[in-house]
Image (cartoon, rainbow, N blue to C red):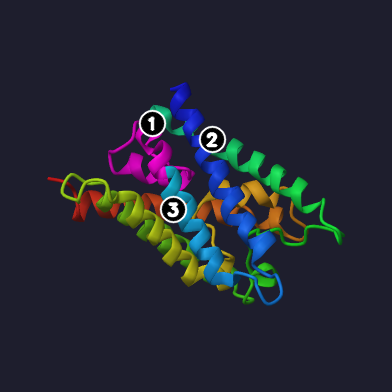
Amino acid sequence: MLKKLSAEFIGTFWLVFGGCGSAVLAAGVADVGIGWLGVSLAFGLTVLTMAYAVGHISGGHFNPAVSLGLMVAGKFDAKDLIPYWLAQVAGALVAGLALYMVVSGGPDFTGVGGFASNGYGEASPGGYSMTSALIIEVVLTAAFLFVILGATSSGAPAGFAPIAIGLGLTLIHLISIPVTNTSVNPARSTGVALFADGPAMAQLWLFWVAPLLGGAIGGVLWKTLGSDE
């Protein structure tokens, strides 16, 4: 179990440091910045690379909503859920701290601003409402779980699951960065909200409730419509 929890800590750290780091450090650089497309790809690459690196140890969840959805689908032991959540949140918080330390050493540092945090209303990149944020986070997390369960099922081509999952997360970001800055992962949201300026902490509840609900829905959908049997 210690190896599994360590793998989840490292994988979630990489997801937050790589994905949010790309948004904070590289997205807005004049003329050469990677923009939303680059950030979307970065998040997908973090999951793809760590799924190959440590997925065989822990299952490569890196996300409390994924752990819950897998449990609902009967693919993960309920007794391991809370330990996985704690490891994932811890990895995200350490990544947020490390990223904060990097950003605060910049030559023109005056504050971290939004710090790649998730939000709705005034904190939404496109000004979308709380209802919009709730709907898109539930729908996309449910779809993400369906992709994960399908890609890792016994009938799927062996060895390709991390690619499908990483590209799935890339697509999710391409859709929803304008709405919520894309969470679909409560640990990812928590890891940067703690350090962000603005309403990130006050709005964090939605980025736990919606992804967890979406993860559970995705698990139910797979169990009823796309099971391995």
Position of 114 compared to 86: left or right?
A: right
Secondary structure of residue under mark 2: helix
Magenta span: predominant SS is helix
Instruction: Report if residue 183 lies within the magenta region.
Output: no
Q: Amino acid at mark 2?
A: Phe
- On the question of residue 85 being in view, the answer is no
Callout 1 crowding tier (Cα within 10 Å): few <14, some 14–19, many ≥20: some
Is the N terminus in the top left, top right, bottom left or bottom right quadrant?
top left
Mark-to-mark CA distance, 2 and 1? 12 Å
Mark-to-mark CA distance, 3 and 1? 26 Å
Who comes first in sequence, dot 2 or dot 1?
Answer: 2
- On the question of residue 7 being in view, the answer is yes
Q: Nearer the viewer, mark 3 or mark 1?
A: 1
Callout 3 crowding tier (Cα within 10 Å): few <14, some 14–19, many ≥20: many
Residue extent of the magenta highlight: 51-77
Q: Mark 2 and 3 residues: CB-CB less than 8 Å, in contact?
A: no
Who comes first in sequence, dot 2 or dot 3?
Answer: 2
Position of 25 compared to 207: left or right?
A: right
Which residue appears at 83% of the width and 58% of the height?
A: 111
Image disc number at residue 57:
1
Q: Which residue is mark 2?
A: 9
Q: Amino acid at mark 1?
A: Ile
Who comes first in sequence, dot 3 or dot 1?
Answer: 1
Image disc number at residue 213:
3
Q: Amino acid at mark 3?
A: Leu
Q: Nearer the viewer, residue 14 or 33?
A: 33
In this rendering, the answer to whether 197 lies above or below 219 is: below
Which residue appears at 35% of the width and 34% of the height?
A: 56
Q: Position of residue 36 (x, y in %)?
A: 57, 70
In this rendering, the answer to whether 120 lies above or below 191 is: below
